[in-house]
Amino acid sequence: MGEVKANAHLDLRGVMCPINFVKAKLKLETLEAGEVLELVLDSGEPIQNVPKSIKEEGHKILEVKKEGEHFRLKIQKG
């Protein structure tokens, strides 16, 4: 399987919970079903809480990559 291309990007480093989830949710609302959003999140609470909340909203986490002190996620809109 090749690299998943993102339709949109959102860098949420330095954004606290739950504001980072709210921003991610608003960005997902601008996408069509099946499109992919790439998020950059801090370690700690953001990477623990945001993916869980995204899944509860009916979206799919395609990829999670640790990059130094932050994480890069690819989310497919449900």
Image: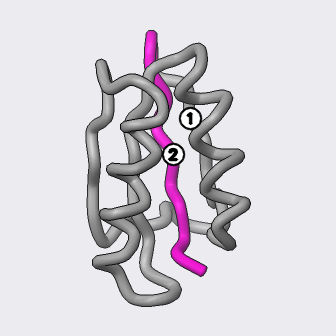
Residue at (53%, 17%) from the top-left corner?
Answer: 43
Q: Where is residue 19? Give x, y as percent.
A: 37, 37
Position of 32 relative to 18 (above/below): below
- Which amino acid is tagged 2? Leu
Image depth: mark 1 or mark 2 in front: 2
Of residues 4 and 17, the one nearer the viewer is: 17
- Mark 1–mark 2 Cα distance, whole angstroms, equals 6 Å
Per the rendered image, the range of residues in magenta is 68-78
Say whether residue 2 is left or right of residue 56.
left
Give the numbered dot on residue 15: none
Q: Marks 2 and 1: in contact by CB < 8 Å?
A: yes
User: Quarter of the image holding residue 76?
Assistant: bottom right
Q: Residue at x 45, y 12 (%)?
A: 68
Q: Which residue is mark 1?
A: 65
Question: Is residue 4 magenta-colored?
Answer: no
Residue 18 versus residue 39 in the image, above or below: above
Is residue 3 placed above or below 16 in the rendered structure?
Answer: below
Q: Amino acid at mark 1?
A: Lys
Rendered image: mark on residue 73: 2
Q: Position of residue 50 (x, y in %)?
A: 57, 41
The residue positioned 39% from the left and 88% from the top of the image is: 32
